[in-house]
Amino acid sequence: MGAGCSRNAGQPSDAPKITKGVPGDAPSVRSQPDSEESSSVHNYSQYGHLKQEDEGDLANLTPQQLFAREARSRRLTERIGEGRLSPDANEDAESAVDPDSLHHFRFSENLVLSTGKKNVVKAHVAYQSQEGQEPGYRKSNQDTCFCKSNLSGTQRALFGVFDGHGPNGHHVSAFVKDNLPSYVGAHSLFREYPGQALKESFQTTHDRLMSTRIDCEFSGCTAAAVLLDKKTVYCAWAGDTRVVIGRVCDDGKFETVGLTVDHKPDLPGEKMRIEKMKGRVARLQDENGNPVGPNRVWLKYAWVPGLAMSRAIGDGLACRVGITCEPDVNQYEISAEDKYLIMASDGLWEFLTNEEAVAIVAECTTPEQACDILVEKSRERWLREEDGVVDDITVLVVFFP
């Protein structure tokens, strides 16, 4: 490996040791979302479904009620826990999300990030989102993403990818997409400690979401956000939405640097937190009692809610047993060797490794082309491996010339 690959050499791509992350001496101050800059983001009625009448605390439910709720939630886990909608899901509620926005969309933009003649960073960004499919079921795209340049009047750009799950996952991801940028830009620490502002804005977004009319008891979204400040990348994530860097070595080969590690329930630290909150980590069981699928998060004495990730925004029930919206944050300095940044929902990563994704992008001449091919390759593998089932796939690619 040449000198151009020495940075982060020897690190596994899924376990980055980038920097100290959020500055440790940054004071912990929440954003002020009621400021003039962010006051426009509080019209929650557009996000649709009303919360249902409270069924009462789980401890007060009769065995019959608990069984009915458990059975319903098991169906949700199987059919919409991973972003799929059953034919009659939420038919009784009026959706304010534009149906045309729930299928396929794309975007591209050229960025110049600079505060003067020095530290000029040019970037070309594109994203694409494609709804999934499941034979016999309606399918709405529960993924969303954004690119915000000149955030809060600065030369900083903010990118985000969000993967909804549950019956109202599309409403949750839409809410996060529409509101997180404003909370970040309005945060009192945004200019001096942008990493801390990004981290705390996840909590602000979650808190505001839980106060809306969106029913989040069994719905939420994973989230990844990247703040590009000249040559510094601040990456915050909760869940299994992933961010990787592609960098070229002296020998012309590409190296992959993972900026995120998927938050899975069976990771030691995540499992410890969940069990401390009286949650349970286990795999589903088939009719013969054999474990199937990934480890999931459950109530201690019931097979709900069944999340396959340990961090997310929303998910009211799961939050009571250890699911948290608190993101991890990494800080990364872009060098001349860094050529690409890839953000994507788990629909892409299910059948593509970090290294495969970087190799595909390295063969492309534009981020638009990279998005097209990544989505196409991923869909092909889904169709081949899952008998016609395809998850939503959202990809955002940044080229650094």
Image: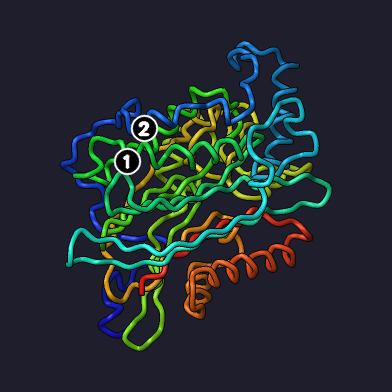
Kindly identify which residue carries mark 1.
Answer: 185
- Give the residue displayed 30% in from the left and 32% down from the top: 31
* Residue 264 point in image, percent of width and height: 50, 48
Query: In the rendered image, is residue 290 in sight?
Result: yes
Number of numbered callouts drawn: 2
Of residues 282 and 154, the one drawn nearer to the viewer in this rendering: 154
Residue type, numbered disc 2: Ser
Asked whether disc 1 touches disc 2, contact meaning CB atoms under 8 Å apart, the reply is yes
Residue 123 picture location, percent across and down? 37, 66
Mark 1: amino acid: Gly
In the figure, residue 58 lies in which quadrant? top right
For image coordinates 28% across by 46% down, the residue present is 153
**Which residue: 49% across, 29% down?**
209
Name the residue at the bottom extreme: 251
Residue matched to label 2: 38
Instruction: Please tell me which residue lies in front, 308 or 377.
Output: 377
Relative to residue 248, is residue 126 depicted above or below?
above
For the C terminus, the image quarter is bottom left
Query: Whole-percent x and y of residue 253?
Result: 40, 84
Determine whether 154 is above or below 188 in the image. Answer: below
Foreground residue among 383 and 179: 179
- The residue under the point 79% across, 45% down is 137
Q: CA distance from mark 1 to mark 2?
A: 8 Å
